[in-house]
Image (cartoon, rainbow, N blue to C red):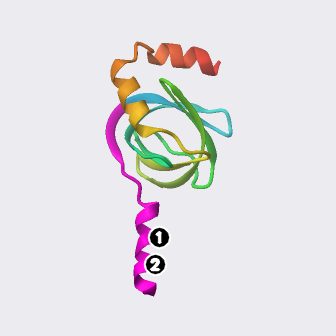
């Protein structure tokens, strides 16, 4: 019985990841802004690529079309990193909106200045 309970808890934490290719910005707690590409996203986090990640444990803001979310950097490796969002997101809405979004990186840049 204990094994079934543990298994259910473990599966509950493993939310579906949606593979995407969404450009956005990562703003570090030091104010440094970098262009990044979200490679996958779930309700509680995302994997980014194409940047120089801040140190693990850093508080950051991820800015995408239709999303601005506080997060904590929980791992990094070369030019990739993983974020844990401060509050849940709807990954399906993000994927749908990213595919039809007319908002460009220039518009995102204006929002963070």
x 62%, y 22%: residue: 112
Between 98 and 90, the residue placed more toward the observer is 90
Q: Is residue 8 above or below residue 67?
A: below
Residue 50 in view here: no
Q: Quadrant of the N terminus?
A: bottom left
Q: Position of residue 19 (x, y in %)?
A: 31, 42
Between 45 and 97, the residue placed more toward the observer is 97
Between 41 and 4, the residue placed more toward the observer is 4
x 40%, y 24%: residue: 97
- Classify residue 45 as left or right of residue 110: left
The secondary element bearing badge 1 is classed as helix
Q: Position of residue 21 (x, y in %)?
A: 33, 33
Q: Quadrant of the C terminus?
A: top right
In magenta, the rendered stretch is: 1-21
Q: Position of residue 60 (x, y in %)?
A: 61, 41
Residue 72 in view here: yes
For this orientation, the residue located farthest to the right is: 30
x 63%, y 49%: residue: 58
CB-based contact (under 8 Å), mark 2 and mark 1: yes
Q: CA distance from mark 2 to mark 1?
A: 6 Å
* 6 inside magenta stretch: yes
Q: Which residue bears the numbered disc 2? A: 5
The secondary element bearing badge 2 is classed as helix
Q: Which residue bears the numbered disc 1? A: 9
x 51%, y 45%: residue: 53
């Amino acid at each position: 019985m204990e094994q079934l309970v543990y298994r259910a808890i473990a599966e509950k934490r493993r939310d579906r990841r949606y593979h995407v290719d969404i450009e956005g910005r990562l703003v570090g707690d030091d104010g440094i802004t970098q262009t990044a590409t979200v490679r996958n996203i779930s309700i509680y986090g995302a994997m980014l690529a194409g940047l120089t990640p801040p140190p693990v444990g850093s508080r950051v803001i991820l800015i995408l079309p239709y999303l601005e979310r506080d997060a904590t950097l929980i791992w990094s490796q070369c030019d990739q990193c993983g974020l844990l969002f401060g509050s849940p997101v709807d990954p399906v809405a993000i994927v749908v909106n990213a595919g039809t979004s007319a908002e460009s990186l220039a518009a995102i840049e204006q929002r963070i200045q």
